[in-house]
């Protein structure tokens, strides 16, 4: 059952809201995971409902690939490490970990086939389902309010698991800036000095330390070539505006 290219399975038990299934699929896809299994969902056709597809928002391929089974035992077929997600204290059961603390250890080679198990929106995981798992993940939340929406919980666990596996590189959205060199900055300062004298702001006979201070300001700002052109345009307008 498990995809060899992505040995991670997200298992949702007893889901009752179509939107949560779609949002969970989206949460998985943005983190690079593909295998979704639903255990006894409230609606048998939940994977094709309009709200599910709408909330998946481009992750319809996850829904097409998803499986519906009747029991957690079936959903865990092939899973080597099952992780329950729950926040309710229990008298006994598998050890409880925060995802960020424990998942890096789980991700260490050799990488196992991992299944993340989520309970229903209304009741969470039943004790018997938790007892089937090797570990319990508890997402740290405010002590005053710890109720997470199902899809939110899937997103957090998917993100933490992806980070534990090495994460994705952040892609630059803008080109690398072209920094102005010293000559360009000095040309700008000379231009501004003429403009400030022209409008009467700078007395050339008593300049004090205005220009050196502007020089320090420009250095701290670390101007780009484009910004130098912009500021020289302002200086040009100042020179022409008094004529």
Image: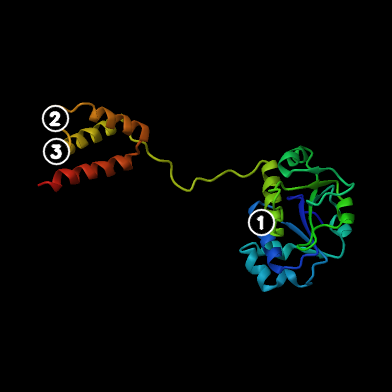
Which quarter of the image is occupied by the N terminus?
A: bottom right
* Disc 3: which residue: 200
Neighbourhood count class around disc 2 (C-alpha, 10 Å): few under 14, some 14–19, many 20 upward:
few
In x, y percent, where is residue 38?
A: 79, 63
Alpha carbons under labels 1 and 3: distance apart: 60 Å
Neighbourhood count class around disc 3 (C-alpha, 10 Å): few under 14, some 14–19, many 20 upward:
few
In x, y percent, where is residue 155?
A: 67, 53
Q: From the viewer's perspective, is the residue at label 1 or at label 3 nearer?
A: 3
In x, y percent, where is residue 203?
A: 14, 32
Mark 1 element type = helix
Mark 3 element type = loop
Residue at the image position 87 percent from the left and 62 percent from the top: 71
**Does residue 156 appear left or right of residue 117 in this picture?**
left
Label ID, residue 197: none
Alpha carbons under labels 2 and 1: distance apart: 63 Å
* Disc 2: which residue: 204
| Figure quadrant of residue 99 | top right
Residue at the image position 71 percent from the left and 50 percent from the top: 157
Q: Looking at this view, is 27 or 123 the one in front?
A: 123
Give whichever of discs 2 and 1 has the lower sequence position. Answer: 1
Q: Is residue 181 visible?
A: no
Q: Looking at this view, is 80 or 214 the one in front?
A: 214
Q: From the viewer's perspective, is the residue at label 2 or at label 1 nearer?
A: 2
How many marks the image carries: the answer is: 3
Q: How is the image coloured?
A: rainbow
Label ID, residue 27: 1
């Amino acid at each position: 059952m498990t995809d060899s290219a992505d040995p991670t399975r997200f298992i949702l038990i007893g889901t009752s809201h179509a939107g949560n299934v779609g949002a969970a699929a989206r949460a998985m896809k943005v983190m690079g995971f593909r295998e979704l299994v639903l255990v006894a969902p409230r609606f048998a056709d939940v994977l094709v409902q309009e709200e599910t597809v709408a909330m998946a928002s481009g992750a319809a391929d996850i829904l097409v690939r998803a499986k519906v089974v009747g029991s957690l035992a079936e959903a865990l077929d092939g899973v080597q490490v099952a992780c329950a997600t729950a926040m309710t204290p229990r008298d006994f059961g598998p050890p409880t970990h925060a995802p960020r603390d424990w998942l890096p250890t789980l991700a260490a080679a050799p990488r196992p086939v991992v299944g993340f198990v989520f309970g229903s929106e209304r009741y969470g995981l039943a004790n018997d389902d938790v007892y089937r798992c090797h570990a319990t993940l508890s997402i740290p939340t405010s002590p005053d309010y710890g109720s997470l929406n199902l899809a939110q919980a899937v997103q957090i666990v998917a993100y933490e698991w992806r980070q534990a596996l090495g994460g994705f590189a952040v892609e630059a959205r803008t080109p690398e800036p072209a920094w102005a060199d010293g000559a360009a900055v000095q040309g700008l300062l000379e231009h501004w000095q003429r403009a400030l004298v022209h409008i009467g702001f700078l007395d050339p006979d008593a300049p004090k330390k205005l220009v050196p201070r502007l020089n320090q300001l420009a250095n701290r700002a670390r101007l780009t070539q484009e910004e130098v052109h912009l500021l020289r345009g302002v200086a040009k307008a100042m020179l022409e505006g008094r004529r």
